[in-house]
Image: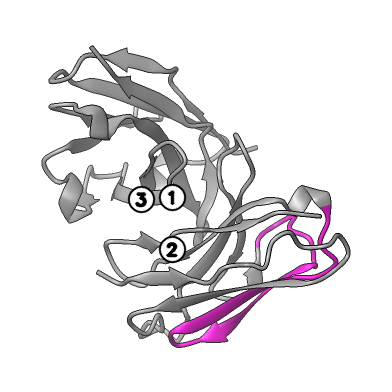
Amino acid sequence: EVLLQQSGAELVRPGSSVKISCKASGYTFTDYYMHWVKQRPEQGLVWIGRINPANGNTVYAEKFKSKATLTADKSSNTAYMQLSSLTSEDTATYFCTSTIAAIPFAYWGQGTLVTVSS
Amino acid sequence: DIVMTQGALPNPVPSGESASITCRSSKSLVYKDGKTYLNWFLQRPGQSPQLLTYWTSTRASGVSERFSGSGSGTYFTLKISRVRAEDAGVYYCQQVREYPYTFGAGTKLELK
């Protein structure tokens, strides 16, 4: 069974950084891209970018190029997203989601709520 | 970036009736391999999005036959037959034809 288990909710200060994780199981981690999606409270879905866990190659949406950094640890089958210079605009739930066997966005993590507040 | 524009539903929708959601893209979603890269998702309150259909009309594993995707080029439709209580939530279309992948703003389905 494919599972994407994300780290817990974070409360962080404005101007700081946060790193959230997504541990994959039930498939070969390095075979498929991992994507990240942002959802602000009561808002829609926004694609942040994706990483190829096999070689670390990344693609970002333009607006997240200086905000998000995607990495992957093959030894622990875990993908990470670091968000920097946090503001209230970054308060959101962040999802990891994987395209497996050419089926896009078939599996999703449970989401990680990041709250930016002083 | 490809802009995805979704239509609204005449909420609330009576249980047992059909509902259709439209989605229009600002550019053709047909790729050079001949496939059309349009996905539909349902996000129920408090849950992660669930993939319903991909490549315009292929149902994801475990998804009810009551959900059917259709369309081509830049115009797409998700039809929900015999609407049930568990179908309530927000529906999103998404293009994965090219980066950056983009979603529609969402269409809310409420049941009567």
Query: Could you tell me residue A45's position as x and y percent?
Result: 42, 50
- What element does badge 3 sit on? strand
Chain to which mark 3 belongs: A
Q: Is residue A37 above or below residue B96?
A: above
The answer to whether A101 appears left or right of B33 in the picture is: right
Mark closer to the observer (1, 3): 1
Query: Could you tell me residue A66's position as x and y percent?
Result: 11, 41
Chain to which mark 1 belongs: A
Which residues lie in the magenta part? B60-84
**CB atoms of marks 2 and 1 within 8 Å:** yes
The answer as to whether the residues below labels 2 and 1 share one chain is no
- What element does badge 1 sit on? loop
The answer as to whether the residues below labels 1 and 3 share one chain is yes
The answer as to whether the residues below labels 3 and 2 share one chain is no
**CB atoms of marks 1 and 3 within 8 Å:** yes
Q: Amino acid at mark 2?
A: Gly
Q: State which quadrant residue A38 falls in.
A: top left
Name the residue tied to disc 1: A44
Name the residue tied to disc 3: A46
Which residue: 47% across, 80% down?
B36
User: Do we see residue B92 in this rendering?
Assistant: yes
Quarter holding the N terminus of chain A is: top right
Chain to which mark 2 belongs: B
Name the residue tied to disc 2: B104
Which residue: 23% across, 11% down?
A118
Query: Could you tell me residue B108's position as x and y percent?
Result: 60, 56
Q: Amino acid at mark 3?
A: Val
Separation (CA) of disc 2 from disc 1: 8 Å
Q: Is residue A94 above or below residue B102?
A: above
* Of the pair A89 and A109, the residue shown nearer to us: A89
